[in-house]
């Protein structure tokens, strides 16, 4: 019996879907690249990549009905993972070049420019993960991940007051200033960096996600 987890890489025109497909297949997932609604809804996990401008990604996502797919999956507790701009669009809004664009509003907060001497933040960096992180389980504190971005979420404002609901686990990184590098929030996980380009550390991280599906 095939016990591989089915993962759909949502193909809405923004994101290196082939590298994501290869990385997921490498760690044992059954991967399909598609924007087909039924396939995206029925998969064990949905991965939402993203590169380029926040506003363009949102426009492409809406054309593919991606915001509806993500919302429906999360309403049913079905796992979704965002990568890079695929993480940024999960926030309330993004501001690029003075233009404000509404995001998916799964999390409060604004994605804005990184304040650093060198932008974009491009290359390898460490992160500060919580001790109880499932996403970074088995990974050393000095492990490095591959980032390519000029914008980020600088604050985390989502509070959970219900003691029966596990508080989100937020991972941080620093490039000029601290920013949100990853989030584990129930069925919704995301990374600002590219696990599919992060070598062995990224492979372990994707394995950790797949094992929760």
Image (spheres, rainbow, N blue to C red):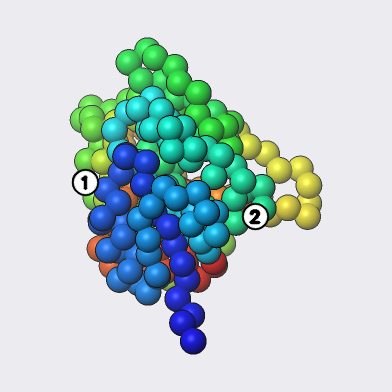
Q: Which secondary structure lies at badge 2?
A: loop
Image quarter of the C terminus: bottom right
Camera-side mark, 2 or 1: 2
Q: Position of residue 182 (x, y in %)?
A: 45, 48
Q: Position of residue 115 (x, y in %)?
A: 32, 25
Residue positioned 60% across, 56% down in the render = 78
Tag count in the figure?
Answer: 2
- For the residue carrying disc 1, how many other residues have a C-alpha within 10 Å: few (<14), some (14-19), or many (20+)? few
Q: Looking at the image, is mark 2 or mark 1 earlier in the sequence?
A: 2
Residue positioned 55% across, 59% down in the render = 42
- Relative to the observer, which residue lies in front, 94 or 139? 94
- For the residue carrying disc 2, how many other residues have a C-alpha within 10 Å: few (<14), some (14-19), or many (20+)? few
Q: Are marks 2 and 1 in contact (CB under 8 Å)?
A: no
Residue 54 in sight here: no
Residue positioned 53% across, 33% down in the render = 104
Residue positioned 76% across, 43% down in the render = 161
Q: Position of residue 44 (x, y in %)?
A: 53, 64
Residue sitting farthest toward the top: 98
Residue 206 in sight here: yes
| Residue 7 in the image: above or below residue 11 | below
| Residue 38 in the image: above or below residue 7 | above
User: Which label number is shown at residue 77?
Assistant: 2
Q: Position of residue 26 (x, y in %)?
A: 30, 71
- How far apart marks 2 and 1 lie (CA) works out to 33 Å
User: Which label number is shown at residue 111?
Assistant: none
| Residue 45 in the image: above or below residue 17 | below
Q: Which secondary structure lies at badge 1?
A: strand
**Residue underneath mark 1:** 123
- Relative to the observer, which residue lies in front, 147 or 117? 147
């Amino acid at each position: 019996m095939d016990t591989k987890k089915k993962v759909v890489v949502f193909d809405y025109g923004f994101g290196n879907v082939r590298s994501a497909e290869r990385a997921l297949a490498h760690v044992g997932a059954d991967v399909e690249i598609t924007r087909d609604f039924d396939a995206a809804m029925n998969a064990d996990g949905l991965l939402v990549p993203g590169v380029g401008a926040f506003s363009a990604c949102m426009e492409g996502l809406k054309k593919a009905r991606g915001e509806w797919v993500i919302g429906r999956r999360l309403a049913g507790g079905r796992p979704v993972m965002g990568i890079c701009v695929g993480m940024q669009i999960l926030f309330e809004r993004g501001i690029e070049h003075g233009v404000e664009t509404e995001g998916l509003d799964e999390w409060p907060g604004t994605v804005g420019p990184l304040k650093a001497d060198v932008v974009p933040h491009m290359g390898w960096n460490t992160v500060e993960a919580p001790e109880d992180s499932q996403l970074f389980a088995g990974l050393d504190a000095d492990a490095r991940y591959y980032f390519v971005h000029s914008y980020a979420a600088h604050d985390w404002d989502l509070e959970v007051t219900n003691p029966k609901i596990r508080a989100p686990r937020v991972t941080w990184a620093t490039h000029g200033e601290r920013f949100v590098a990853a989030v584990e929030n129930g069925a919704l996980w995301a990374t600002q960096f590219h696990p599919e380009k992060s070598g062995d550390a990224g492979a372990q991280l994707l394995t950790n996600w797949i094992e929760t599906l």
